[in-house]
Amino acid sequence: MGMAKFFYICVLMVLGTVKGYSQISQTGSNFELQGVVKEKESNQGLSGVTVSANNGEYTLTNAKGEFKIVVGLGQELVFESPSMETLRYRVASKDYLEIVVGTANKDNIGSSRSSKVESSTSLYKRYIDSANFYKKKDIRKSIDFITQSLSQLGIGSNKQQLAMAYSTLGEVYQYHKQYDLAISSYKDAMNANKTLKTSLLLGKTYVLNKEYGEAEKLLSPLVKMTNMVPFQRVELYETLGDAYIGLGDVDNAVAFYGEGLKIADKNQIAPKTIDLNSKIATAYAKGNRLQEANAYFNNSLELSSGQAPQRAVQEKEKVADFYNRKNQYGQEIQLRKKSLEDLKKIPKNEVSGELSIENDSISAQRINYKIANAYIAQDKYDEAIPYLEESIKDADVDDDLLVRKDATRKLSEVYRYKGDYTKALETYQEYVAVVDTLYIRKEQEIARAAQFNRELASKQSRISGLEQERELTQSKYSLALTEQQLVAESIKRQNWIIYSLIFGMLLMGLAAYFFYRSNKQQKLANNLLALKSLRSQMNPHFIFNALNSVNNFIAKSDERSANRYLSDFSTLMRAVLENSDEDFIPLSKELELLELYTKLEHSRFSDKFDYEIIVDGGIDVDAFQIPPMLLQPYIENAIWHGLRYREDKGFLKIELGQKDRQALEISIIDNGIGRKQSAALKTQNQKKQKSKGMGNIKKRIEILNDMYKDKVDVFISDLETNGTGTKVLFTIKRD
């Protein structure tokens, strides 16, 4: 670093300190500080600079060098990047902050590269270690640290480091049951650097995601490898066995489990020995070979008795479930009572969230409930009642509404079987109250899950952007070297004036071309960003309206309709979220979503309208693409603002027809009260607010038509001359 750069940084720090002391009286609560980090010579923003504050907040600069961070007056900011020396700055005001730094001299690019790589590698390792630390505690922090680790992998990045970052990201997603994202991350890791560990992790995730065929196809070739350690070999055979169980091939599953068991026995891998005995027993039970299943379950029980109480309880419960399926209720009850005794030996904080069998959690309330069910199966109602009461009591303490609901309902049934109808009614009323609470909680969980998925999508998008940015940095570095060579060549030939002029003119033409292309790409990027923003606004709008329908059923205590509506709604939501990142989807998919949405609205307003969806048989629906959620807001308007206000039953007609070989016409026709009368019925508050869904659709159509040359056209008109009814006509062109 030159003296000029050192002097410049010192002046910045002194000025910042003086200004900070002059404004010390302004110190107050935290606020969001915005700023930019620029390179001195080019005045361009520096991306990937880590900005951290001493209050624990941190962020990264974006592609333009901009950042936002929550700090307080008087706090210190630290700016770190492999391409610059660490810079500290004390926050003295809430004004926009501009940090100007010097970078390595272009003439010394080659010589300074080794020190940069060393610094970047050190930061990379710290971020990966932090991501692993938070992997099971805080998924958001863990992903943020992985994002920062990826930002350190710049020019000539190590493929092994890139693979490790993506593999760690996959493990984070896998632990938090985001299996689709985990699979995608493991594939990225294998593209960078294929390893046995990543292959095994990917195979296991395929099994967890019920993609058994993909797991078998990935792992079967690994059987021939000879350089595996025993534990990896056992894991390979166990995962292949799991895959064959999922495919319904019990014989192959038992064969692979058996091979894994031999290696585990030989190398004294005790936990795997128990697991494989248990899995062989489960496989035999699925094949209805109960005698063999019983023998292996006895082995797993005996082996687990010497392990930690947690493992022993898991195995007892698995075997007890087996006895239940065989109707051996006496042995089941005896084993579950032993499980209850073992649970008392385990600290409460070690039981919660850790003990489970195939997504069935193990707890005192659940075991008591199962014991009661075994007694009820033998018509021993008096013996069952104390266990049901204990189950309800434990579930109430742990706030376990699911078990509390089931146990309360079962207790009501037992009282009814015994003829004690008073207690049966009281208990049933308690059951209804628990169900109401459970529905409210489920509704909240759906909202949290939607928010969580949006956050994950945003973070995943950031990671994808970093990878593209890393590749762009590599290209810039190559261009910088090329530019040096061109400058050196022009100095040697400076006497050739005519050729220099021609060369200069070519450069100007090339610059103009790149400027034109850059503007075009920037416009495309802006359009894509706007589309993504509008789609992200459509989904919460749609979810909010749909949840209102669910709330209506719950308010009416219509449990069956609410359950049915929630089931259809979850199917619709999954499809909507899957398509939310796409500009266009096949018309056939949009029709499926459309039919499901209309069915849901009809279930709520069945007395207000009937509907019909007509698709011309001559249309090749797979040949057309359509923006997702394009038609839904218009159907929603037809139902909510037109048909809903009719005095008698109305009709909604959705018709698809071929306009010509290259265009398709979609019409949405309703015989509702019409747009003018609907507007007259609005309240003053409603008149001030425009429909968010319709506004977003109009903006999306404008942007898409700008990008794809008038692909979609919409025309809205009154159906009748007296202003009643509405007709919406879409024209969609083939790609």
Image (spheres, rainbow, N blue to C red):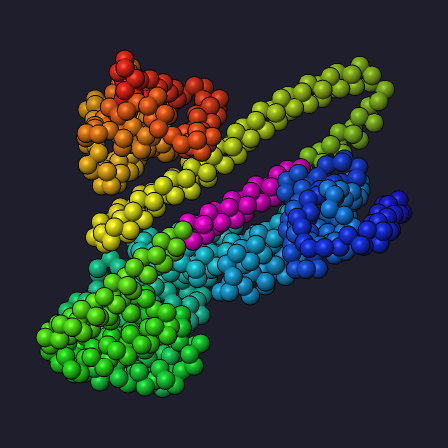
Instruction: Residue at 56%, 42% (x, y): give it.
Output: 465
Give the x, y percent position of residue 665.
Answer: 30, 20
In-front residue for pair 482/660: 660
- Residue 181 in sight from this viewpoint: no
Is 183 on the left or on the right of 359, as rendered? right
Where does the magenta region start and end? Answer: 448-477
Instruction: Residue at 34%, 26% (x, y): give it.
Output: 678
Residue 472, above or below 409: above
Instruction: Residue at 25%, 63% (x, y): give it.
Output: 432
Image quarter for residue 651?
Answer: top left
Dominant secondary-structure state across the stretch colored magenta = helix
In-front residue for pair 198/140: 140
**Quarter of the image with the C terminus in it:** top left
Give the total of numbered labels: 0
Is 646 on the left or on the right of 218, as rendered? left
Give the x, y percent position of residue 550.
Answer: 30, 47
Question: Would residue 462 be counted in the magenta stretch?
Answer: yes
Image quarter for residue 722?
Answer: top left
Instruction: Residue at 34%, 64% (x, y): give it.
Output: 239
In-front residue for pair 510/326: 326
- Residue 687 in sight from this viewpoint: yes
